[in-house]
Amino acid sequence: MASENTKGEPSAPPSYQEPPGGPYQHEPPPNYEPPKEGYQSGCYSGYPPQQGYQTIYTQQPTVIVMNESSFGPTPKHTVCQHCRAEIDTSITYQVGGLTWLAAGMLCLFGSWMGCCLLPFCMPCTMNVVHDCPVCHQYLGTFYRLE
Ligand SMILES: [Zn+2]
């Protein structure tokens, strides 16, 4: 008995019916389209960049430079890149970073009266410049301290 109360009466459909042939008719809407095409052809730049567009710079200057790190503090037996002669490099000493560092260290430890200039007379603290004894071209430098 209680179940019938919840069900209620079946509501009859409203008697809605269009007047046939009435003056009011549903006209089909005009050819209205959302502006989808104009939107897509706009400045939409969300696409990923093309792969083949980037330019890869792989050209390197072909400068014949010997590996300066191969030079040591002593003359090296090598072939000159300039005159193609088989030579032993002639070395000259040059004041480098370690020279100044050693001089600064001596100054800090109180070695004054010109003792701080001692590293400038010590080849073991100086860079070694390698030259070709034949053509006197610069070949490389051995750096004590980069
Ligand atoms: Zn040479």
Image (cartoon, rainbow, N blue to C red):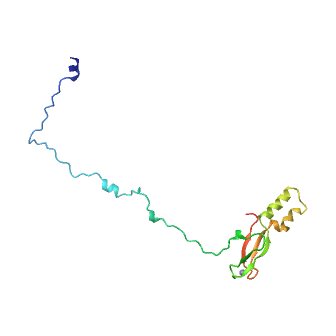
In the rendering, at what x and y percent does residue 62 appear? 60, 75
Camera-nearest residue between 119 and 1:
1
Residue 54 appears left or right of 67: left
Above or below residue 31? Residue 98 is below
- List x then y, in percent, for residue 15: 13, 32
Q: Quadrant of ligand 1?
A: bottom right
Q: Nearer the viewer, residue 145 or 14?
A: 145
Which of the 4 quarters of the picture holds residue 106? bottom right
Residue found at x 23% / y 17%: 2
The quadrant of the rendering that contains the C terminus is bottom right
For the point 31% across and 53% down, which residue is it?
Answer: 36
Q: Position of residue 119 (x, y in %)?
A: 84, 65
Viewer-proximal residue, 45 or 144?
144
Judge whether 33 appears above or below 12 on screen: below
Horizontal side of 8 relative to 121 (left or right) equals left
At 34% from the left edge and 55% from the top edge, which residue is drawn? Answer: 39
Left or right? Give the position of 75 relative to 25.
right
